[in-house]
Image (cartoon, grey):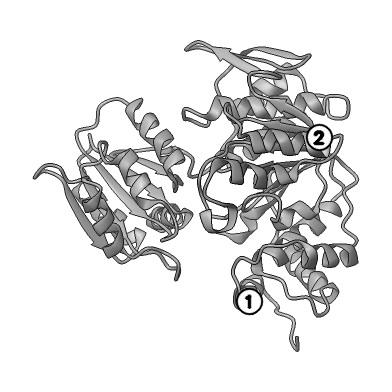
Amino acid sequence: MSKIPATLPEWLALLETRHSKEIDMGLERVASVKKRLDIEFKCPVIMVAGTNGKGSTCAMLEAVLLKAGYRVGLYSKPHFLDFNERARINGENVSDQVFIDTFAEVEVKREQTSLTYFEFTTLAICKLLADANLDVVILEVGLGGRLDAVNVIDADVSIVTSIDIDHIEYLGDTREKIGFEKAGIFRPGKSAICGDPLPPQSLIDHANAVGADLWLFGRDFNYNGDKQQWNFAGRTQRRNSLAYPSLRGANQLLNASAVLAALEALRDVLPVSAQEVRTGLVMVDLPGRFQVMPGRPTVVLDVAHNPHAAATLSQNLDNMGFHAYTYAVFGSMLDKDIEGVVEQLKGKVDHWHVCDLPLPRAASAEQLKEKVIAAGALVDLEKTVATYNSPEEAYADAMSKAGENDRIVVFGSFLTVAGVLRARRSALH
């Protein structure tokens, strides 16, 4: 490469166009560059995989460990507005300059090895976190587990949040196949926590085969609660009278339980008090996960993009109380089970605003419209579906039509939520 980019946007533009495939499964190339970069973590590493709930679980871990006074590094993805959201140190996004310097280092050390955008940026973020003198690092897996670039790191505790059908072309078309891929992050002799109440047998078998210390929900840890508070019970540790996490939604106690199981597994090296758990869970903040925005009409942002997540979103909408009409702003990748998502939400939505997204592998607004109609979402004359060139356009039209007692639900791809967040941000300035 002749010229090293001088800014972060220039770097990202280069990385997006360099490798022939957006996703190129396999760890050999990443592992070779990791070795040359000498990436070594001198603190505990917690790795989080799963179909849904990864981001929430990482955010809760970060919030509780920060509250306990630890220096915490976090790698999460994708980002909404700024690439810097992907790497955080002590709750703050990493600066452009740190990324630029680390990208330059990876560029030199990769030599002739071809890396995808995701592989290159994963190595850079692991390198900067490994060098940041931290007490604990949380790494979110991108796709699957076994062959994901993050899995070149050996975790001290691995969490699999949930297992459902998604990314079929890479991970397989059954929960058993996908469970095996997710279990690929488990390590011999290390704690492996599964927060899914019905884990596939393949995950249990793989954990046993590699000699991981498997924690199963319902056997090794569980929770119970009433309307005011909830309690966690682990193998040797109980946490009672906990406030509900500030992240709203039906599955957040499952995610929070997996978090507390991971903290129990690390209690000798990273002790956390009951009060730090309470405060951390109440303080946790994560955009786009059943995020209810202030003001009227009610606006809900949710990155639900598969049927499992859409079912949870549907349940959460039911718990919100009465709204006269519900407008949906919906954009999706074409490789998703769009019919399955619409099926979960069609009874909740009156007016569909479907939109194009700025990626070649996105479904077009016309394709989404066809699928909404085919799913029987327009059962009466009151219901409508309209197409838009972008999430921003779809959202602007929904806002112009919705009354103050209505609600607008923005869901689907991260890009759908990001477009609306960008529109809201520019409206404030």
Return the disc, 2 or 1, that comes first in the chain's sequence: 1
Q: Amino acid at mark 1?
A: Glu
Residue 318 image label = none
Q: Residue furthest bottom?
A: 2
Q: Nearer the viewer, mark 2 or mark 1?
A: 2
> In terms of secondary structure, where does tag 2 sit?
loop
The C terminus appears in which quarter of the rendering? bottom left
Is residue 95 at all visible to an observer of this figure?
A: yes
> In terms of depth relative to the viewer, which is nearer, 103 or 140?
140
Q: Position of residue 168 (x, y in %)?
A: 52, 54
Q: Position of residue 319 (x, y in %)?
A: 36, 25
Question: In this view, which residue lies farthest toward the left?
Answer: 381
Q: Which residue is mark 2?
A: 212
**Residue at point 45%, 39% (across, down):** 308
Tell me which residue sits at (73%, 64%) in the image: 99
Q: Quadrant of residue 216?
A: top right
Callout 1 secondary element: helix
Q: Residue at x 70, y 79 (%)?
A: 5
For residue 5, above or below residue 139: below
Which residue, given by chain and number where applicable, does mark 1 sit on?
Answer: 10
Residue 359 is left or right of residue 410, and the answer is right
Quote the CA–CA distance across marks 2 and 1.
42 Å
Residue 313 location (% of width, % of height): 40, 36
| Residue 254: quadrant of the picture | top right
Mark 2 and mark 1 residues within 8 Å of each other at the beta carbon: no
Please rate how many residues cluster around mark 1, counting C-alpha atoms within 10 Å: few if below 14, some from 14 to 19, many from 20.
few
Q: Amino acid at mark 2?
A: Ala
What residue is rendered at 58% in x and 36% in y?
A: 162
